[in-house]
Amino acid sequence: MAMPEADGGDVAAQIEADPGLRRTPIIFVTALVTEAEAKAGLRIQGRPFLPKPISISDLINRIEENLPVHTAF
């Protein structure tokens, strides 16, 4: 889905501003990965990104790396 009116940084800022969503992990998926975009992605609270087309194994690895670990008590 193209986002003509907002970019990933805008969406991330909106998510972080919402107390109910603040802790939601974000992984950016982009069709265009230039050096500037890679740097911009790294500046958004260190949010990771994946270039399109994505592989399922890369997506699973990135999700596992970025989901909070919950321990049972």
Image (cartoon, rainbow, N blue to C red):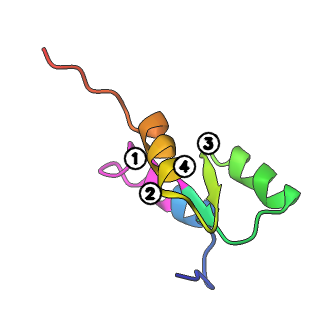
Out of 53 and 18, give the one closest to the viewer: 53
Residue type highlighted by circle 1: Arg
Most extreme residue toward the top, as rendered? 73
On the picture, is 37 further left or further right than 49? right
| Contact, mark 2 vs mark 1 (Cβ under 8 Å) | yes
Query: What range is drawn magenta here?
Result: 14-27
Identify the element where label 3 is drawn. Answer: loop
Residue type highlighted by circle 2: Ile
Q: Which residue is mark 3?
A: 45
Mark nearer the N terminus (4 vs 2): 2
Mark nearer the N terminus (3 vs 2): 2
Q: CA distance from mark 1 to mark 4?
A: 25 Å
On the picture, is 7 further left or further right than 22? right
Identify the element where label 1 is drawn. Answer: loop
Residue shown at 62%/56% (left/top)?
50
Q: Residues within 10 Å of mark 1 (few under 14, many from 20)?
A: few
Identify the element where label 4 is drawn. Answer: helix
Mark nearer the N terminus (1 vs 4): 1
Q: CA distance from mark 3 to mark 4?
A: 21 Å
| Quarter of the image with the C terminus in it | top left
Residue shown at 57%/58% (left/top)?
28
Place of residue 33 in the rendered image (x, y in percent of width and height, measured from the top left): 77, 63
Q: CA distance from mark 4 to mark 2?
A: 24 Å
In reply to whether residue 21 is colored magenta, the answer given is yes
Q: Which residue is mark 4?
A: 58
In reply to whether residue 38 is colored magenta, the answer given is no
Q: Residues within 10 Å of mark 3 (few under 14, many from 20)?
A: few
Q: Which residue is mark 1?
A: 22
Q: CA distance from mark 3 to mark 1?
A: 12 Å
Q: Which residue is mark 2?
A: 15
